[in-house]
Image: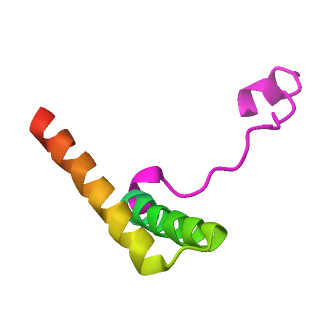
Amino acid sequence: MHLLLLLGQQPPPPVQSHLPVQGPPSGSYGLFCKGLTHTLLIFDLAWRLCINFPCLYMVASMMLNAHLRVHTEIH
């Protein structure tokens, strides 16, 4: 910048970024947020369907367990 002033040229104006502000890196809260999101979705589903929560939790746990078994058997 000092070289530009010595040569008699004006420095370019600062560039304003229109990019959205990003939150914390995805790796820092990724696992926690994923588990929390799943739990909140189950609570929300139970509330909307007026289903007894322990019943819905048991069914969702069995479905997730079956999904995890298939996933681990493939790998």
**Where's the N terminus, which quadrant?**
top right
Q: Is residue 73 left or right of residue 58?
A: left
x, y percent for residue 23: 60, 56
Q: How is the image coloured?
A: rainbow
Q: In the image, what residue occupies the spot 23% across and 50% down? A: 66
Q: Nearer the viewer, residue 39 or 30?
A: 39
Does residue 19 appear in the picture of this structure? yes
**Where's the C terminus, which quadrant?**
top left
x, y percent for residue 14: 82, 36
Q: Nearer the viewer, residue 34 or 48?
A: 48
**13 within the magenta span:** yes
Does residue 75 appear in the picture of this structure? no
Vertical side of 17 occupied by 59: above or below: below
Query: What is the chief secondary structure element of the magenta stretch?
Result: loop
Q: In the image, what residue occupies the spot 36% across and 64% down? A: 59
Q: Which residues are magenta?
A: 1-29
Q: In the image, what residue occupies the spot 54% across and 73% down? A: 51
- Image quadrant where residue 2 sits: top right
**23 within the magenta span:** yes
Vertical side of 7 occupied by 25: above or below: below
Q: In the image, what residue occupies the spot 40% across and 64% down? A: 35
- Image quadrant where residue 44 sits: bottom right
x, y percent for residue 45: 57, 65
Q: How many numbered discs? A: 0
Q: Is residue 36 left or right of residue 65?
A: right
Q: Is residue 67 left or right of residue 20?
A: left
Q: Nearer the viewer, residue 9 or 33?
A: 33
Vertical side of 25 occupied by 38: above or below: below
Q: Nearer the viewer, residue 59 or 8?
A: 59
